[in-house]
Amino acid sequence: MVFDDDGNVSPARIAVRIVDKLAGRKFLECDEILDNMRRFLWLKRFSGASDEMVLEHLKDASIIAEIAQEIMPFSILDAEEIIMETRLALWMQNYARVPGSVFGRQYLASTGDHLSEVKPVDLN
């Protein structure tokens, strides 16, 4: 488990661990993996099917199974929060350096790093 300073489980810290597991993949591929992770969680929780049966129908089953180890101990709502935190971390990682963007303003607010000197990111 990953805990915050107060001893509570921290969705944001779990999200950072998941982002580390997704390192080296393209942004859109990571987003698709997170969508498939959500499908896996919901199917697993409410169908009663085995992990293997659910995973055989999903793309990127190996990484989904790895991420599931981080999320499965939690309730479905907590798991959704972790997935949303992961998605936010990925978006911040990819778009925080775009000047004038919402993510850029959030990044600036949280770090104090001035983005005015940063060149725009090529999103193509």
Image (spheres, rainbow, N blue to C red):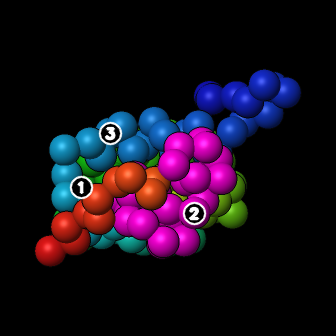
Q: Check the image and name the residue furthest to the front.
A: 117
Instruction: For the N terminus, give its image quadrant.
Output: top right
Which residue is at 73% across, 30% downward?
4
Rendering quarter of residue 26: bottom left
Give, as a single range, the part of the protein colored magenta. Answer: 92-114
What's the CA distance linking mark 2 and mark 1? 35 Å
Q: Residue furthest left?
A: 124
**Residue 121 in the image: above or below residue 8:** below
Q: How many numbered marks does the figure carry?
A: 3
Q: Main secondary structure of the magenta part?
A: helix
Q: Which of disc 1 and disc 2 is earlier in sequence?
A: 1
Q: Give the image quarter of residue 7.
A: top right
Could you tell me the amino acid type at mark 2? Arg
Instruction: Name the foreground residue: 3 vs 122.
Output: 122
Of the two numbered discs 2 and 3 on the same chain, state the one appearing first in sequence: 3
Please give the name of the residue rendered at 65% of the width and 53% of the height, measured from the top-left corner: 109
Instruction: Report, in whole angstroms, how far the alpha carbon at label 1 lies from the one at label 3.
Output: 14 Å
Magenta-span inclusion, residue 111: yes
* Secondary structure found at label 1: helix
x and y percent of residue 50 in the render?
39, 56
User: SS class of the residue under badge 3?
Assistant: helix
**In terms of depth relative to the viewer, which is nearer, 23 or 99?**
99
Left or right: 62, with 108 as reference point: left
Number of residues whose C-alpha sits closer than 10 Å to that of mark 1, classed few (under 14), some (14–19) or many (20 or more): some
Choose between 17 and 39: the one closer to the eye: 17
| Quadrant location, the C terminus | bottom left
Residue beneath disc 1 = 61
The residue where tag 3 is placed is: 21
